[in-house]
Amino acid sequence: MTQIFTTASLASYWSAPEISANALIFLNLVGALLLGLVVGYERTYQGRAVGMRTYGLVCMSSAALTVLAGYPSLWFGGNVGGPLSSDPTRIVQGIVTGVGFLGAGVIMKDGLNIRGLTTAASIWSSCVIGVLVGVGFYAAAILLAGLSTVCMVGVHRLERLLPSRSGVAVVVQFKKGVQPHEDSLRKFAATRGYDILDDTLSINMRDGATEWHFIAVVQDRRAQVSMPELAQLMSAYDGVGSFQLSHCRN
């Protein structure tokens, strides 16, 4: 009967090549964890549900799965009983696919708003950082982590400086028997500094009351009214029973 737990088989897991490989993998994991935490801090600072722990785990795990592909001869203590090869590209493909499902889980649709897109994209970026660490492109991994952080922190401020048209998701329920006119509603929005996007208008009927869903974008930041002021104007609009306003965010 073949003895599985022999002194030689156990010692193979602690040979010089195994210890050297484990030391290098350990440093890769620590580096990937730190880079993931750096990228995830912005989400934590913004109060998002997905924060530093998630980013650190994704980045570190991606690095671990990638780096192990570089040492197939040392798998199972080198006791594989024959030649063993690995395909790093297939491992990377599996990592990206798995993280894609994780990113899809944080994307939520709330009425006309879609939330979580930035978080999903940054999680995917954290995965790629881990892959770069795993294959040994340390400088590229550090650069990608830095650029991702700058993009998530600085570009948001840059967007405020550049000309842009922010949007407001509007849900309006009119009183029963009221038949709203699109032209009058567009004129009302235009006088307050907003344009109603044509391809966002949808009309529902609930309990005999007409309900409109649309997105209004800012014509000019200097002429637009604030959200509280817009709410007061909507409450005074003739025929409006109830409404809901929310910023379009991702």
Image (cartoon, rainbow, N blue to C red):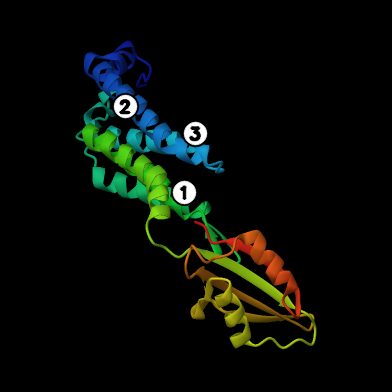
Q: Is residue 207 visible?
A: yes
Element on which disc 2 rests: helix
In the figure, 67 relative to 217: above or below?
above
Q: Toward which corner of the image does residue 245 lie, by quadrant?
A: bottom right
Q: Quadrant of the N terminus?
A: top left
> Label 2: which residue?
76
> Label 3: which residue?
53
Query: Image check: 250 left or right of 178?
Result: left
Element on which disc 3 rests: helix
The residue at 58%/71% (across/down) is 192
Q: Nearer the viewer, mark 1 or mark 3?
A: 1
Q: Earlier in the sequence, mark 3 or mark 2?
A: 3
Q: Where in the figure is residue 143, as x and y percent of width and height?
A: 26, 37
The total number of labels drawn is 3
Q: Residue furthest left?
A: 83
Q: Nearer the viewer, residue 196 or 111?
A: 196
Q: Nearer the viewer, residue 37 or 159?
A: 159
> Label 1: which residue?
119
Q: Earlier in the sequence, mark 1 or mark 3?
A: 3
